[in-house]
Image (cartoon, grey):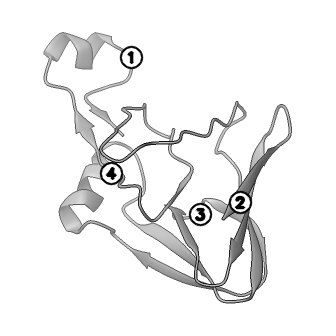
Amino acid sequence: MQYKIIGSFMESVDIHLKQGESVYTESGGMAWMRGSFDMNTNTRGGLGAGIGRVLAGESLFLTTYICKSPDGLITFTPEVPGKVIDLKLEAGQSMICQKDAFMCAEESVKLEMHFRKRLGAGLFGGEGFILQ
């Protein structure tokens, strides 16, 4: 799998996949693709994980794109203008982000919701009680 971030203001991410490789995103996160892909939509992590995403203002379902052709290209664009940042997470490493920060990930990345325990941070922090 190879990827390239393209643009400066309205950036997009082009991901080149070989046969059998896959990525996942929220429903509606894919902009366009070239090649043959299987698309599977589910709650990914069970109903509890899906409900957690809904409470955070995200989609209940996630879509997995599996490349079926020898080479495929799939492009993802953000919901709003801004900078696209690639994060390379090591095994066991995690990152807490605000809602709508997630764009796409490879299969080894687990998307979970983080619940703030401090009342003041949830009310006055600007991000709410539930983060990704």
Which residue is painted at 41% across and 55% down in the image? Answer: 109
Say which element carries label 3: loop
Type of amino acid under label 2: Gln
Q: Quadrant of the N terminus?
A: bottom right
Residue underneath mark 1? 126
Residue underneath mark 2? 2
Out of 49 and 34, give the one closest to the viewer: 34
Left or right, 16 with reference to 106: right
Residue underneath mark 4? 53
Q: Where 38 sits versus 49, above or below?
A: below
Q: Count the marks: how many?
A: 4
Which residue is painted at 28% across and 44% down in the image? Answer: 113
Q: Give the mark nearest the N terminus, 4 or 3.
A: 3
Type of amino acid under label 1: Gly
Residue underneath mark 3? 28
Residue density around tag 3, few if under 14, some if 14–19, many if 20 or more, within 10 Å? few
Q: CA distance from mark 3 to mark 2?
A: 21 Å
Q: CA distance from mark 2 to mark 1?
A: 35 Å
Q: Nearer the viewer, mark 2 or mark 1?
A: 2
Q: CA distance from mark 1 to mark 3?
A: 26 Å
